[in-house]
Image (cartoon, rainbow, N blue to C red):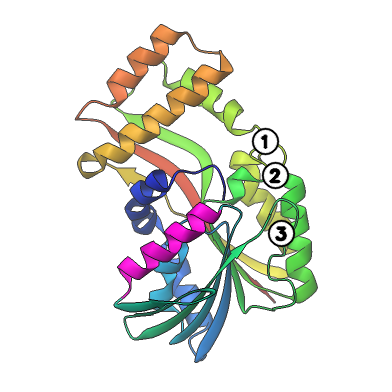
């Protein structure tokens, strides 16, 4: 995905990995347990966090195609995978890595997902994945992706789609106004048309079910506390920046809210959902 700083993606990775729904990860692992090799296309790959999260539960030989429109993120993904792996070497297309006895052939693909969700083109993968993507895209884009999945009968696993629910503790009197303004800002076009936001996973599940998929959803909330102060602060600052752009909340209120929610004692729960879908 373009538009996301590597620093933000690095900062959120630990919380993302902790939040993933373990039951759905187990279902994913079971689905491919009898396979020796697997090819995975990861949409909006960013720094490759999705690979690092689920590669340990997938077969011993893995071919990953990491798809993003931002060449700087793809280059950073190569470096992040190299640092994470037990061993690695650069290749013309990306990187070869070994982690926990699994051999990973990683291809880095620059591709405009907004124009074409079906980034796999003529290469039919065994699995399509994404993380923290669907709340950013439009309803029309979801329809186009589902149509592409159906045409090639591909399964989907996606994690960390925001469900629109955030709870800050201690609470602040402006929480409701800030959340409402942030949600309206979040619904703006992120490059894929008006963002589906909190409706995204419901839309995706409905479309997939109608197309004959068996779909399972499960919660994967961030639960941020004393060890996540940097992430909480970055999240709070991001909210304030977005809310300021709406002009819906007075500046003094925003500043007071920010001060309250970057204090040492603050905790935060951010709702997400994961989804797995296979053809029946």
Q: Nearer the viewer, residue 216 or 162?
A: 162
In the displayed structure, 194 sits above or below 99; it is: above
User: Disc 3, disc 2: CB below 8 Å?
Assistant: no
Label 3: which residue? 117
Residue 273: which numbered mark, if any? none
Label the magenta part by its dominant secondary structure. Answer: helix
Q: Position of residue 163 (x, y in %)?
A: 53, 43
Is 75 part of what is drawn in magenta? Answer: yes
User: Disc 2, disc 1: CB below 8 Å?
Assistant: yes
Name the side, left or right, on which 72 lies relative to 188.
left
In the displayed structure, 238 sits above or below 62; it is: above
Name the side, left or right, on which 77 lies relative to 146.
left
- Mark 1 Cα within 10 Å, few/some/many (few <14, many 20+)? some
Q: Secondary structure at mark 3?
A: loop
Q: Secondary structure at mark 2?
A: loop
Is residue 172 visible to the viewer in this orientation of the structure? no
Q: Position of residue 82 (x, y in %)?
A: 35, 69
- Mark 2 Cα within 10 Å, few/some/many (few <14, many 20+)? some
State the extent of the magenta-drawn residues as a range: 71-85
The residue located at (68%, 74%) in the rendering is 154
- Real-space CA distance between mark 3 and mark 1, rounded to the nearest whole angstrom: 16 Å
Is residue 101 visible to the viewer in this orientation of the structure? yes
- Mark 3 Cα within 10 Å, few/some/many (few <14, many 20+)? many
Is 9 part of what is drawn in magenta? Answer: no
Counting residues from the start of the chain, the first of labels 3 and 1 encountered is 3
Label 1: which residue? 189
Q: Position of residue 3 (x, y in %)?
A: 54, 42
The residue located at (20%, 30%) in the rendering is 265
Label 2: which residue? 192
Q: Position of residue 251 (x, y in %)?
A: 44, 9
- Real-space CA distance between mark 3 and mark 2, rounded to the nearest whole angstrom: 10 Å
């Amino acid at each position: 995905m373009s538009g996301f700083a590597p620093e933000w993606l690095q900062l959120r990775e630990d919380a993302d990995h902790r939040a993933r729904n373990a039951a759905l990860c187990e279902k994913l692992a079971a689905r491919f347990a009898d396979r020796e090799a697997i090819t995975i296309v990861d949409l909006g790959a960013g720094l490759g966090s999705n690979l690092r999260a689920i590669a340990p539960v997938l077969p011993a030989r893995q071919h990953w195609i990491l798809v993003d429109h931002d060449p700087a993120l793809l280059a950073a993904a190569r470096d992040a995978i190299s640092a994470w792996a037990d061993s690695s070497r650069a290749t013309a297309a990306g990187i070869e890595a070994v982690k926990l006895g699994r051999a990973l052939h990683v291809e880095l693909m620059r591709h405009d997902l907004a124009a074409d969700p079906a980034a796999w083109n003529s290469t039919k993968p065994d699995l399509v994945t994404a993380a923290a993507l669907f709340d950013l895209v439009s309803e029309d884009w979801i329809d186009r992706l589902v149509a592409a999945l159906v045409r090639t009968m591909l399964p989907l696993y996606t994690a960390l789609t925001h469900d629109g629910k955030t709870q800050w503790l201690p609470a602040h009197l402006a929480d409701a106004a800030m959340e409402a303004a942030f949600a309206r800002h979040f619904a703006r076009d992120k490059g894929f048309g008006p963002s589906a936001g909190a409706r995204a996973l419901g839309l995706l599940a409905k479309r997939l079910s109608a197309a004959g998929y068996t779909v399972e959803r499960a919660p994967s909330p961030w639960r941020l506390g004393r060890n996540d102060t940097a992430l909480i602060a970055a999240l709070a600052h991001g909210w304030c920046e977005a809310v300021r752009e709406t002009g819906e909340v007075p500046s003094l209120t925003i500043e007071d809210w920010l001060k309250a929610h970057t204090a040492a004692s603050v905790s935060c729960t951010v709702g997400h959902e994961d989804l797995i879908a296979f053809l029946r």
